[in-house]
Image (tube, grey):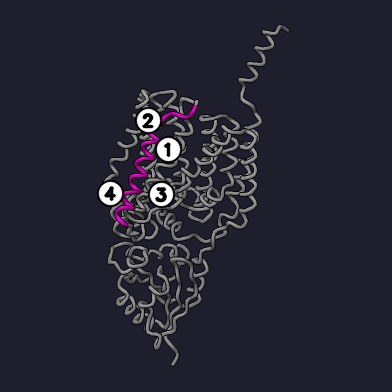
């Protein structure tokens, strides 16, 4: 064989993708699927998961749309609609509802690998997938019947299509990218932050003479498709800011004006550097800067918002960025040393596997509590505080949040008895106490489910001289009390 022929064969062989990374990824994928599916129905639903079940059980899309608008601000309709049709087939059990999260979590793992191949190479993609597959965040998201696995999968799919239309423009690809972009804020309003970060990245391209016409079209399509829901989103934002609901925003930190201004300036400077800073990568597509901006800008918005407005920094809200961080870490370390990247990926995955048995979420009380109420008697009322779940000096602020009581939803999922469910005003302790005393006296016993801490709930509790109050359960932002008339 001639040297030219041998060189041609070697070249063709080198261009052919290696099967080994794909085989290793397939093994990781199967192992992740087993871990994500393990004990899905072991723990009772938490309150947020019960809201997912409640929304999915609604009779139609109109009722589903009203659920986040009225009762679950910030969580948008797309997840609930998809879950509704999914449960029409598989039912409303814990395993059924959580299994959809497993599916989206496995999709996320495949997308991490695909993004790694698109932005770097197969080896980097494999390292990123190994770091994400068994990450405690990935496992927790997979085991919860919430919209976060869906948000992560949609966000990464949108990122992948955006990268492709950025480098290989096509009208159909741009339309698909725009639809996925709109699906993000329809799943969770944090998706708007991601769209903003992507617009900043495309602005950098424009400043460097790169038009990205189809990519801009995708962002515009995403925004246009979300416009019809914008009035509802604005209303929800107002509820979140002024309702002081713990799951979204707490009471303001009241930082000095100078601190707020400084935080805003730092955020502006970081954004300007990411958009207009000089190029430091050899790759003209700047995958590292792209990932840094895609991950950091939404997180920075939450941090600055926490300083200027109210606390809103929660890892769940930038979950797509956490998943994408595995790509960033693999890409950064791989640019320095392939050997250390591979060692880090393997070591991190092993460490996560070792920690998994110790990272299980705390069991929720609702299944056991339903049994206790059944044993206590069918006439005993169960009291739930209405209003937004809040703490500190906002606990007594009148508001129209959750008129039926926030914790009545998980209780009703597990309890089907005839016991009266009574909403008491969480922001009016005197009225709540009066109602509890009257109803418990008439029934001979009752239960109070509260989101307040011990000091805040004391004014609601009945007179200790006439009633016996026993705290049967407590965890942060949830307490259960058994109340009975005192024996004379």
Query: Sequence order check: which comes first, mark 2 or mark 3?
Result: 3
Assess whether mark 2 and mark 1 are in contact (beta carbons under 8 angstroms): yes
Q: Is residue 338 visible?
A: yes
Q: Which residues are magenta?
A: 256-281
**Considering the image in quadrants, where does the N terminus appear?**
top right
Inter-mark Cα distance, 2 to 3? 36 Å
Query: Sequence order check: which comes first, mark 1 or mark 2?
Result: 2
Query: Sequence order check: which comes first, mark 3 or mark 4?
Result: 3
Q: Which residue is mark 4?
A: 234
Assess whether mark 3 and mark 2 are in contact (beta carbons under 8 angstroms): no
Depth order, front residue of 242/433? 242
Query: Sequence order check: which comes first, mark 4 or mark 1?
Result: 4
Depth order, front residue of 207/91? 207
**Of labels 2 and 4, the one closer to you:** 2
Q: Which residue is mark 3?
A: 80
Secondary structure mostly seen in magenta is helix
**Considering the image in quadrants, where does the C terminus appear?**
bottom left
Inter-mark Cα distance, 2 to 4? 29 Å
Inter-mark Cα distance, 1 to 2? 11 Å
Residue 248, image x and y in percent? 38, 56
Inter-mark Cα distance, 3 to 1? 30 Å
Residue 145, image x and y in percent? 48, 53
Residue 126, image x and y in percent? 60, 35
Depth order, front residue of 254/345? 254
**Of labels 2 and 3, the one closer to you:** 2
Reply above or below: 94 against 226.
Answer: below
Q: Which residue is mark 2?
A: 204
């Amino acid at each position: 064989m001639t040297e030219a022929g041998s060189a041609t064969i070697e070249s063709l062989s080198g261009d052919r993708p290696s099967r080994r990374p794909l085989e290793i990824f397939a093994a990781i994928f199967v192992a992740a699927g087993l871990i994500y599916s393990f004990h899905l129905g072991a723990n009772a639903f938490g309150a947020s998961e019960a809201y997912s079940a409640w929304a999915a059980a609604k009779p139609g899309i109109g009722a589903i749309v009203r659920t986040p608008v009225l009762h679950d601000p910030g969580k948008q309709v797309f997840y609930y609609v998809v879950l509704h049709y999914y449960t029409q087939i598989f039912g409303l059990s814990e395993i059924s509802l959580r299994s959809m999260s497993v599916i989206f979590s496995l999709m996320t793992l495949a997308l991490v690998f695909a993004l790694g191949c698109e932005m770097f190479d197969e080896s980097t993609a494999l390292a990123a997938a190994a770091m994400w597959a068994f990450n405690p965040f990935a496992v927790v998201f997979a085991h919860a019947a919430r919209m976060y696995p869906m948000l992560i999968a949609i966000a990464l799919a949108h990122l992948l299509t955006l990268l492709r239309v950025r480098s290989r423009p096509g009208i159909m690809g741009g339309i698909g990218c725009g639809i996925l972009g709109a699906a993000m804020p329809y799943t969770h309003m944090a998706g708007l932050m991601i769209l903003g970060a992507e617009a900043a990245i495309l602005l950098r391209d424009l400043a460097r003479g790169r038009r990205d016409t189809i990519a801009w079209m995708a962002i515009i399509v995403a925004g246009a498709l979300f416009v019809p829901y914008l009035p509802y989103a604005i209303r929800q934002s107002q509820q979140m800011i002024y309702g002081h609901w713990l799951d979204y925003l707490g009471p303001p930190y009241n930082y000095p004006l100078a601190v707020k201004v400084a935080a805003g300036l730092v955020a502006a400077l970081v954004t300007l550097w990411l958009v207009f800073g000089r190029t430091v990568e050899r790759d003209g597509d700047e995958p590292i800067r792209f990932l840094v901006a895609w991950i950091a800008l939404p997180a920075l918005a939450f941090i600055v918002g926490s300083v200027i407005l109210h606390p809103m920094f929660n890892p769940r809200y930038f979950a797509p960025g956490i998943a994408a961080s595995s790509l960033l870490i693999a890409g950064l370390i791989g640019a320095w040393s392939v050997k250390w990247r591979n060692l880090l990926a393997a070591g991190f995955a092993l460490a996560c596997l070792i920690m998994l048995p110790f990272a299980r979420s705390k069991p929720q009380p609702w299944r056991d509590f339903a049994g206790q109420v059944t044993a206590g008697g069918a006439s005993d009322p169960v009291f739930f505080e209405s209003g937004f779940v809040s703490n500190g000096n906002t606990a007594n602020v009148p508001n129209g949040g959750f008129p039926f009581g926030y914790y009545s939803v998980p209780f009703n999922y597990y309890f089907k008895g005839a016991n009266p469910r009574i909403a008491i005003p969480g922001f009016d302790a005197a009225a709540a106490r009066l109602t509890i005393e009257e109803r418990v006296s008439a029934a001979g016993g009752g239960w109070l489910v509260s989101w307040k801490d011990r000091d805040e709930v004391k004014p609601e509790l009945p007179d200790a001289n006439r009633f016996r109050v026993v705290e049967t359960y407590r965890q942060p932002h949830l307490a259960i009390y058994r109340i009975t008339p005192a024996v004379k």
